[in-house]
Image (cartoon, rainbow, N blue to C red):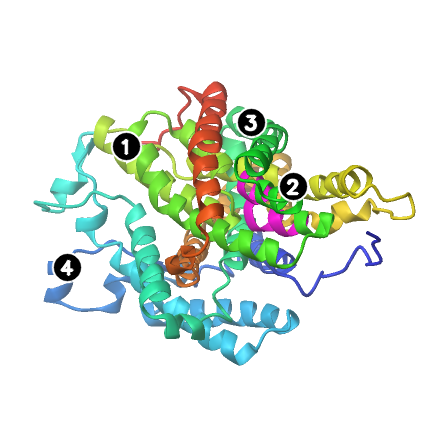
């Protein structure tokens, strides 16, 4: 396997790079707040609402409003359409460079955007979100005059987005096909992850020791995934199921390392037949959706007092970036709501998600190294070819997930400014708050919808052997070991509390 590509290959033509460019463009715009100018406050933010109040006097401003104080005078619809126009333009621009059909992309993106916002607004209805708990002597549930409620907290919009997406993907397949050009959950989530780097920068300033511990644990998870999960799943595939070596290797990477990207990287490294990574990727995506549906609620119910354990375990268990980040966001909201319900104390948002995401990012970072190692092992030990075949070290760079660069740049820039000029922190927080919250949340929501539209559970038919292997590996190997490792590092640790 010889590498002839330049180091800059794909810099303007891949999802990973366009997640970096879009994420850092928005982040840079938010930094202009340091000069006293708000360039991102036009972003629409949903409001909490109660259906009887809205029925009495319908107005758009009851559902959403501009996020920035400088834009308070804007009409709610002006904020909404500006949000649509800016994000559509940015992603359509990237789609053009990626060689997509821009017209079909814009039409699909528009539909996804509208479904996302419908779920987001509906999910903020108080009967869905409000938690019956007394905090600092005040019970907001009772103050709102509620007599019943599902008490899902901020997880309600995510659940509605997922339900809407799955309904389209499984019961409106013609419509889902029309959305295919824009239904790119990995692109949206990777852009949101760049935004999340800003959040980590803020968290590092607030609780640096905690943030560093999450990073160290993520590094430990890398060893578990590559040196523990992979050999076990490979052996299981070979000995218990009788798969060929190339199929077993691709399955082991997809199931135990980092999903689709690992399956594709491994298939390329060992020159597996094209059908192998396609089949494995399909099963990985479907199981990732099942994990997204099941694990956040399960972990919340089983261990409501172990938020960081649950987050880190999720990061080691769910094998696609989109599903892991989405599941982490849902777990974050469900556990915050549950803890508020049980103790009357409210954890800060984002720490559980960070535990999940940092664990997953560390695993992603080393997929290039793993593909490089597998290529050498396959050539020398399996195929036993001579030294004429070379594997270039640049292959590590080509396999490296580029969106991670945007995540760390956003984190380091935020942290660097805050550390060097503490007096600027209030302005920095104010300017980047829109990026950290409504913008990131919207892209997470779009990920839920897009993942749902691309998930067709009927495709599990005919994949019995591979599906059985995945299910067994998940239940008896990956999930329990991941939870044990997370427990070892994080038991008893909880996020900081929201200030009274």
Instruction: From the viewer's side, name the closer residue of 13 and 424.
Output: 13
Do the residues under discs 4 and 2 have CB atoms within 8 angstroms?
A: no
Q: Earlier in the sequence, mark 4 or mark 2?
A: 4
Q: Residue 350, percent across and down?
A: 43, 39
Residue 396 occupies quadrant: top right
Q: Which residues lie in the magenta part? A: 253-265
- Asked which secondary structure carries label 3, the reply is helix
Q: CA distance from mark 2 to mark 1?
A: 31 Å
Q: CA distance from mark 2 to mark 3?
A: 14 Å
Counting every numbered tag in the picture gives: 4
Mark 4 highlights which residue?
51
Q: Taking 77 as reference, is 51 above or below it?
A: above
- Asked which secondary structure carries label 4, the reply is helix
| Residue drawn where x is 58% and y is 43% of the image | 243
Check if residue 256 falls in the magenta segment. yes
| Residue drawn where x is 32% and y is 27% of the image | 303
Mark 1 highlights which residue?
301
């Amino acid at each position: 396997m010889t590498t002839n590509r330049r180091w800059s290959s794909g810099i303007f033509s891949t999802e990973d790079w366009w997640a970096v460019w879009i994420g850092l463009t928005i982040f840079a715009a938010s930094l202009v707040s340091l000069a006293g100018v708000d360039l991102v406050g036009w972003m629409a933010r949903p409001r909490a609402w109660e259906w009887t109040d809205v029925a009495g006097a319908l107005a758009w401003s009851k559902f959403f409003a501009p996020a920035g104080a400088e834009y308070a005078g804007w009409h709610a619809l002006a904020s909404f359409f500006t949000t649509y126009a800016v994000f559509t333009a940015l992603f359509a621009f990237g789609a053009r460079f990626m060689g997509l059909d821009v017209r079909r992309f814009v039409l699909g993106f528009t539909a996804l955007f509208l479904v996302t916002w419908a779920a987001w607004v509906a999910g903020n209805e108080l009967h869905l979100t409000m938690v019956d708990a007394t905090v600092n002597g005040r019970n907001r549930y009772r103050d709102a005059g509620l007599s019943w409620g599902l008490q899902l907290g901020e997880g309600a919009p995510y659940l509605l987005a997922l339900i809407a997406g799955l309904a389209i993907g499984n019961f409106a397949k013609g419509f889902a096909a029309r959305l295919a050009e824009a239904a790119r959950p990995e692109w949206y989530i990777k852009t949101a992850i760049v935004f999340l780097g800003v959040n980590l920068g803020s968290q590092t300033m607030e609780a640096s020791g905690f943030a560093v511990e999450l990073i160290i644990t993520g590094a430990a998870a890398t060893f578990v995934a590559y040196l523990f999960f992979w050999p076990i799943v490979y052996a299981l595939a070979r000995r218990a199921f009788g798969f060929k070596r190339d199929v077993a290797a691709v399955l082991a990477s997809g199931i135990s390392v980092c999903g689709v990207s690992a399956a594709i990287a491994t298939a390329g490294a060992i020159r597996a037949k094209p059908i192998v990574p396609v089949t494995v990727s399909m099963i990985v995506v479907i199981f990732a959706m099942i994990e997204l549906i099941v694990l956040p609620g399960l972990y919340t119910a089983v261990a409501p007092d172990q938020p960081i354990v649950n987050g880190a375990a999720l990061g080691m268990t769910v094998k696609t970036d989109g599903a892991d980040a989405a599941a982490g966001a849902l777990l974050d909201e469900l556990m915050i709501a549950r803890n508020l319900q049980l103790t009357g104390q409210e954890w800060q948002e984002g720490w559980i998600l960070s535990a999940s995401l940092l664990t997953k990012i560390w695993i992603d970072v080393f997929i290039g190294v793993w593909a490089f190692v597998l290529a050498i092992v396959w050539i020398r030990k399996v195929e036993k070819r001579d030294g004429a075949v070379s594997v270039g070290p640049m292959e590590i760079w080509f396999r490296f997930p580029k969106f991670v660069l945007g995540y760390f740049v956003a984190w380091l820039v935020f942290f660097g400014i805050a550390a060097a000029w503490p007096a600027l922190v209030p302005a920095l927080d104010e300017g980047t708050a829109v990026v950290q919250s409504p913008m990131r949340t919207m892209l997470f929501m779009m990920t839920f919808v897009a993942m749902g539209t691309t998930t067709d559970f009927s495709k599990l038919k005919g994949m019995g052997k591979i599906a059985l292997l995945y299910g067994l590996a998940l239940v008896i190997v990956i999930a329990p070991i991941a939870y044990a490792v997370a427990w070892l590092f994080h038991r008893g640790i909880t996020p900081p509390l929201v200030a009274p």
